[in-house]
């Protein structure tokens, strides 16, 4: 994980060979796609909402430094302690410091993709701290020692029989069952005990409102609320792009987040956290920390096109609609953020040398852009990643630009350019293909193509020739 | 992305951009498009200096090469400001939407945009600009339809294609499951990620087979080459046909 080298091809081969995995993904994601359509039936209304949601995020990004300062001021006024972390290592140290200052050894966690980005659990473990996932999906895969395979539905790749097995194998005294209600009851009982005994609770942040210093957290299970209210200390972590200007920016964002993520009209819990427990209040943590992480984000912000990556509200619907993700699942990407958003975010965070290959895993079908609630031009940014991967000189801004440059591809594309730029050469090449195209050696790209398809055929007479022979005016 | 274009009226002459793939491998489909346009009463001009829209390089990360080839096309179609009709949703999408993107920071941007606004997908143009009417002379047949992602999402050309097929009285159109899903071609994607592409086209073929249709129609030869090649490899007896070629045959009996 992290920025280790990624053997994407091997991952893909393995994922595609796993029939159970493919079936699980197809059925779960087709379900989510249908639910999204059902809950957003009026196309015109949906498009208006997307306009508003996109506008709110773009406005926030346009004045991000100012909004972050306001957020810090407001939070501090409200009694929330704000920390800044430029790197994930810094963010981890901050959280470790908070745990240590309370002699805490047990962290109960709500769902947070940023904490995955930080590899927080692993880091804390090496310092003798237990980090316990309490989101049902995260809980399941933590028991099974796996990373999440989807940003919203971390255990989407498991069916209930597999979950039953994981519980029976990893929880003491629990017999196998695949009855959903029983599985829920087991999880609930185990998790309650964790909330009761946790020293510090951790959560992510869906939106941080600069105007009021409010941390908004959206969830369905109630475990997030437990993490942020039961333990005496609450730590919230967020990427710096999560800030929005005012409460009035939230309605379209919340509607679309919920509808796009799980196909729900409203979510079960919307937690708005403004301060620690006040005098006379009976519950809530005594101390709240907010950790704001950069990890390359301010670099994206500085580039007008790449900045749009930061509009993402992590709804996961681009994953659900991606024909590539549906087939290979999240783990194949070997990265915290899989699917279309991962293809543009991961190379920007981890660099093109290690993760640039992810940008090749797209047919640029545009399905992701079509559904993204905040209209991130994902295919355009995928192309940008591809271009930067070859562009050695240029104004590449992503780490490792030019990393994939190689003589063979450079020559191939130069040859391609000449063939299609110079008409006489084009006529020559096309007529040669028409004559000898079926005798091409079955190597390289042709071999890849013909592993499941018959070889392309070349016509004896090109359209250029036929048109001329038929007397079509050619200027 | 639903796109509404402003269609020219009283069209007398159009340019035809054949695409590199049609030129090399599907010239009959290209000729059928020309025939359909002429039958609708417009003169067709086919500049011989044309070649490829540049999409392969553009999508592969070779922007300068793509721009050089794009410039050559813009030049080839610059003698008059006639509409440019393209028998491929994907290439039309490239020329209509991505040319202006590629040249956004160049001095020729406004000229490029003017060029782009003249680009139309063939089926869309026949239906929405020329309002063609067809009489079917063929035997009863069941077909299904595949849109390229760009014909559907960039050019909004799917409805027009289905309307044209709908005019053919002996043709039954059965819609395919997951019609919105990519067939796995994606140009160089099928070569850079052959396994994923193979899984996608295999599923597409299952969905096609389930319709019971004897032909799969499309307005894009890239998809047809991918789906058709994979069906032939597997021995699936469904014929891949370009929409223009199919219509031309039906109306000529
Ligand atoms: S890129 Fe768009 S669709 Fe994908 S997770 Fe982010 S907001 Fe959702």
Image: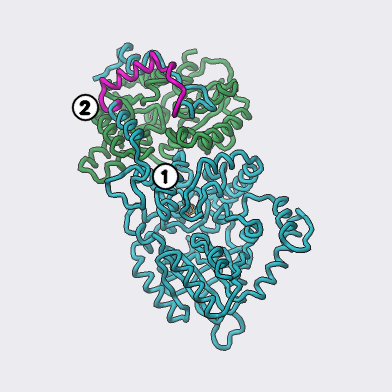
Chain colours: A cyan, B green
Query: Callout 2: helix, strand or loop?
Result: loop
Query: Callout 1: helix, strand or loop?
Result: helix
The magenta segment: A419-444
Say the numbered circle drawn on residue A211: none
Circle nearer the viewer, 1 or 2:
1
> Is the CB atom of the residue marked by disc 1 within 8 angstroms of ligand 1's nearest atom?
no
Work out whether residue A425 or residue B220 is closer to the camera in this orientation and state it.
Answer: A425
Q: How many discs mark residues in the rendered view?
A: 2
Q: Do the residues labelled 1 and 2 touch (CB within 8 Å)?
A: no
Q: Find residue A439 and report its image quarter.
A: top left
In the image, is residue B144 part of the stretch drawn in magenta? no
Q: What chain does badge 2 belong to?
A: B
Residue B93 appearing in the image: yes
Q: Find residue B36 and report its image quarter.
A: top left
Q: Label 2: few (<14), some or many (≥20) within 10 Å?
A: few
Asked if residue A283 is positioned above or below residue A195 in the image, the reply reads below
Residue A153 appearing in the image: no
Work out whether residue B83 or residue A180 is closer to the camera in this orientation and state it.
Answer: A180
Asked if residue A3 is positioned above or below residue A118 in the image, the reply reads above
Q: Position of residue A224 (x, y in %)?
A: 59, 68
Q: Mark 2 points at which residue?
A: B79
Q: Name the residue under label 1.
A: A379
Q: What chain does badge 1 belong to?
A: A
Residue at image coords 30%, 12% = A471
Work out whether residue B212 or residue A132 is closer to the camera in this orientation and state it.
Answer: A132
As measured in the structure, the alpha-carbon distance from the residue carrying label 1 to the one carrying label 2 is: 33 Å
Asked if residue A144 is positioned above or below residue A332 in the image, the reply reads below
In the image, taking residue B149 as reference, residue B12 lies left or right, namely left
């Amino acid at each position: 994980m992290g920025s280790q080298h990624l053997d994407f091809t091997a991952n893909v081969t393995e994922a595609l060979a796993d029939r159970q995995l493919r079936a699980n993904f197809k059925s779960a994601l087709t379900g989510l796609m249908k639910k999204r359509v059902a809950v957003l039936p009026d196309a015109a209304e949906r498009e208006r909402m997307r306009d508003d949601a996109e506008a709110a995020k773009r406005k926030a990004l346009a004045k991000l430094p100012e909004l972050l300062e306001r957020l810090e001021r407001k939070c501090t006024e409200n009694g929330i302690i704000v920390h800044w972390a430029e790197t994930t290592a810094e963010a981890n140290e901050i959280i470790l410091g908070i745990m240590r200052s309370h002699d805490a050894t047990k962290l109960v966690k709500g769902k947070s993709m940023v904490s995955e980005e930080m590899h927080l659990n692993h880091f804390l473990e090496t310092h003798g701290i237990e980090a316990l996932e309490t989101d049902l999906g995260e809980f399941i895969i933590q028991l099974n020692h796996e990373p999440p395979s989807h940003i919203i539905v971390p255990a989407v790749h498991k069916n209930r029989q597999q979950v039953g097995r994981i519980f029976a194998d990893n929880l003491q005294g629990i017999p196998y069952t695949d009855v959903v209600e029983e599985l829920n009851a087991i999880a609930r009982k185990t998790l309650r005990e964790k909330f009761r005994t946790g020293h510090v609770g951790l959560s992510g942040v869906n939106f941080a409102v600069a105007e009021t210093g409010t941390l908004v957290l959206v969830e369905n299970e109630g475990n997030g609320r437990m993490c942020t209210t039961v333990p005496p200390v609450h730590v919230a972590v967020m990427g710096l792009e999560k800030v929005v200007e005012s409460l009035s920016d939230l309605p379209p964002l919340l509607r679309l987040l919920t509808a796009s993520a799980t196909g729900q009209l409203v979510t079960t819990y919307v937690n708005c956290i403004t301060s620690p427990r006040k005098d006379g209040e009976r519950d809530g943590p005594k101390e709240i920390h907010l950790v704001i992480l950069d990890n390359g984000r301010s670099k994206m912000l500085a580039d007008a096109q790449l900045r749009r990556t930061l509009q993402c509200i992590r709804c996961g619907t681009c994953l659900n609609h991606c024909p590539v993700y549906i087939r290979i699942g999240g783990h194949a990407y070997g990265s915290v953020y899989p699917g279309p958003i991962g293809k543009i975010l991961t190379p920007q965070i981890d660099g093109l040398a290690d993760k640039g290959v992810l940008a090749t895993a797209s047919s640029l079908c545009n399905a992701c852009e079509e559904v993204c609630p905040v209209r991130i031009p994902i295919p355009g940014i995928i192309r940008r990643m591809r271009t930067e991967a070859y562009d050695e000189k240029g104004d590449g801004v992503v780490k490792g630009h030019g990393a994939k440059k190689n003589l063979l591809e450079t020559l191939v594309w130069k040859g391609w350019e000449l063939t299609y730029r110079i008409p006489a050469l084009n006529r020559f090449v096309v007529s040669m293909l028409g004559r000898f195209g079926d005798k091409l050696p079955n190597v390289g790209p042709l071999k890849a193509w013909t592993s499941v398809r018959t070889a392309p055929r070349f016509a004896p007479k090109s359209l250029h020739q036929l048109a001329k022979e038929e007397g079509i005016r050619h200027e | 992305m639903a796109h509404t274009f402003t269609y020219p009226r009283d069209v007398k002459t159009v340019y035809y951009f054949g695409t590199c793939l049609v030129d090399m491998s599907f010239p009959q489909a290209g000729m059928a498009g020309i025939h359909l346009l002429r039958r609708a009463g417009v003169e067709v001009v086919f500049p011989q200096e044309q070649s490829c829209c540049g999409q392969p390089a553009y999508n592969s990360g070779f922007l300068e090469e793509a721009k050089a080839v794009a410039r050559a096309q813009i030049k080839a179609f610059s003698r008059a400001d006639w509409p440019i009709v393209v028998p491929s949703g994907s290439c039309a999408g490239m020329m209509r939407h991505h040319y202006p993107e590629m040249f956004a920071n160049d001095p020729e941007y406004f000229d490029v945009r003017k060029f782009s606004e003249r680009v139309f997908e063939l089926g869309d143009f026949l239906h929405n600009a020329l309002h063609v009417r067809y009489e079917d002379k063929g035997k009863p047949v069941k077909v299904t339809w595949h849109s390229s992602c760009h014909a559907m999402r960039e050019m909004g050309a799917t409805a027009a294609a289905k309307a044209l097929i709908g005019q053919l009285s002996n043709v039954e159109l059965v819609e395919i499951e997951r019609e919105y899903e990519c067939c796995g071609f994606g140009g160089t994607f099928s070569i850079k990620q052959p396994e994923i592409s193979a899984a996608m086209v295999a599923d597409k073929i299952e969905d096609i087979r389930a319709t019971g249709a004897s032909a799969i129609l499309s307005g894009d030869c890239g998809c047809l080459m991918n789906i058709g090649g994979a069906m032939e490899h597997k021995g699936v007896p469904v014929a891949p046909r370009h929409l223009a070629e199919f219509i031309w045959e039906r109306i000529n009996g």
